[in-house]
Amino acid sequence: MIKRLIERLEGAKRVRDEQGAAFIELALCLPMLFVLMFGVIEFSQLILDNQIMTGLSRQGSNIASREPNMKLQTIVSALGTQGASLNIGTRGRIIITEVDGTSTKPVIESQAISTTGIPATSVTESWISNPRRNIPLNAKTLLNAGQPIFVTEIFYSYVPITPVGGFLKMKLASTLYDVAYF
């Protein structure tokens, strides 16, 4: 009987020792688990925002190319409404540009810019003002004589939703950019 009592006491002591070790292991692993969890959340949100921007830019150029009588400013306003989930009206900028390639050098025919949002300048203007070789390849293939192309640019000021950047001492992308040519 005494032998059984001694065995039970020794078993109870082992359990207490193992519980303390498990607590220390948890304390060591928890920060890494939080960084991993926050990283997955942050990059998932970044990918979602990028997907929404890609959809908006494609829609803008698609509508502008299919509806030549529609004003570009109307399309910009519609995209601003569709981009409400990103709060594009205050944290973004939408620019739609009509480029005519009839001459030896492309010319901007018209341009519409969202009235509110972050300050941003059109990248299209930079490749128009430079020699023709600076035109992006996917725009160069669309520039045909007598046919305009429509370029929709979306700028978005990304704000992290988790503190993962602070944990890792790194700065995540602050301004996202997407463009579509039709």
Image: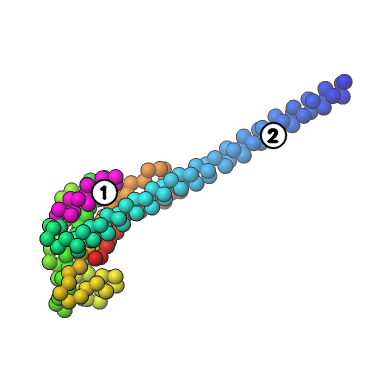
**Figure check: 98 above or below 37:** below
Secondary structure of the residue carrying tag 1 is helix
Q: Position of residue 3 (x, y in %)?
A: 87, 24
> In this orientation, does residue 122 appear?
no
Q: Which residue carries the number 2 mark?
A: 18
Report the magenta stretch's main SS: helix
Say which quadrant the N terminus sits in: top right
Mark 1: few, some, or many residues within 10 Å (few <14, many ≥20)? some
**In this rendering, which labeled residue sits more in front, label 2 or label 1?**
1
Residue at the image position 22 percent from the left and 49 percent from the top:
80
Q: Which residue carries the number 1 mark?
A: 83
**Figure check: 127 above or below 61:** below
Q: Position of residue 83 (x, y in %)?
A: 26, 48
Image-based side of 74 in relation to 152, left or right: left
Residue 136 in magenta stretch: no
Q: Position of residue 37 (x, y in %)?
A: 48, 44
Instruction: Give me the C-alpha separation between circle 2 and circle 1.
Output: 54 Å
> In this orientation, does residue 156 appear?
yes
